[in-house]
Every structure is written in structure tokens, then in C-alpha cells.
Amino acid sequence: MSGTLTAPKTVARRRASVTHSPAAIDHSAMEVSEERRWLVPLVSCFTLAAAFFAAAVGSGRVWLIGPAGICIGLIIIWFVYLGLSSDTNGSD
């Protein structure tokens, strides 16, 4: 690193790429069912864990942390199961 002061270099700006809205993307019935298969169990477990944790923090009852921890364990189990049983690269 030198001790002399140099002028800053100008950086060429790139034009932002065009993004498409999610409504414009056409999903097949198989893709929709796969998305639903992932979202329903994971979102429900996450919502339950968040509710139990919030109740534990809000009420001061420590025993509510137990069900929140069980829900986190269920999320991990669901991730493993869904990852192993998913056939996203298979033929139609």
C-alpha cells in the first residue's frame, strides 16, 4: 500500500435487470402441489413454535419453551423427510 493519494476510479453503472412479477410465472399443477407439500408442514410447525415461544416470553411460563423446542425438532425432521422424498429433478 502506497502513501500517495490517488484519484478515485469511476465505476460504470449497470442497468438493473428486469424482474417479473410472481403472478406472471405459470406453474404446472405438479409444481403447485410440490410447493404446497413443502409449505404446509413447515409453515405450520414454524407458526406453532413462534406462538409457543412468544407465549413463554410474554407470560413468563418456562414450560412453554418445551413445545417450542419440539416444534423446532419437527421442522428439522420435516426438512430431512421432504428433502429425501422430493423428486424435483425426475422426469415428468
Image (cartoon, grey):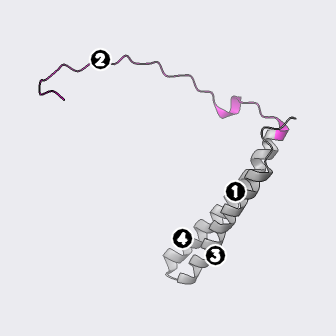
Which residue, given by chain and number where applicable, does mark 4 sit on? 54
Secondary structure of residue under mark 4: helix
Main SS class of the magenta portion in the image: loop
Q: Which mark is residue 79?
A: 1
Whether residue 33 is situated above or below residue 20 in the rendered picture: below
Which residue, given by chain and number where applicable, does mark 3 sit on? 67
Whether residue 19 is situated above or below residue 71 in the rendered picture: above
Task: Bin the neighbour count of mark 4 within 10 Å (Cα to Cα): few under 14, some 14-19, many 20 and up.
Answer: some
Q: CA distance from mark 4 to mark 1?
A: 23 Å
> Label 1 is placed on what type of residue?
Phe
Q: CA distance from mark 2 to mark 4?
A: 49 Å
What number of labels is visible?
A: 4
Which residue, given by chain and number where applicable, does mark 2 sit on? 10
User: Looking at the image, which is closer to me, 22 or 39?
Assistant: 39
Task: Bin the neighbour count of mark 1 within 10 Å (Cα to Cα): few under 14, some 14-19, many 20 and up.
Answer: some
Task: Bin the neighbour count of mark 3 within 10 Å (Cα to Cα): few under 14, some 14-19, many 20 and up.
Answer: some
Whether residue 12 is situated above or below residue 88 in the rendered picture: above
Residue 61 percent across, percent down from the top left: 53, 83
Q: Earlier in the sequence, mark 4 or mark 1?
A: 4
The magenta-colored residue range is: 1-30
Q: The N terminus is located in which quarter?
A: top left
Label 3 close to label 4 by CB (< 8 Å): no
Task: Name the mark nearer the viewer: 2 or 3.
Answer: 2
Residue 4: say if magenta: yes
User: Looking at the image, which is closer to me, 6 or 18?
Assistant: 6
Q: Residue at x 29, y 17 (%)?
A: 10
Task: Name the mark nearer the viewer: 4 or 1.
Answer: 1
Q: CA distance from mark 3 to mark 4?
A: 12 Å
Secondary structure of residue under mark 2: loop
Task: Bin the neighbour count of mark 2 within 10 Å (Cα to Cα): few under 14, some 14-19, many 20 and up.
Answer: few
Q: The C terminus is located in which quarter?
A: top right
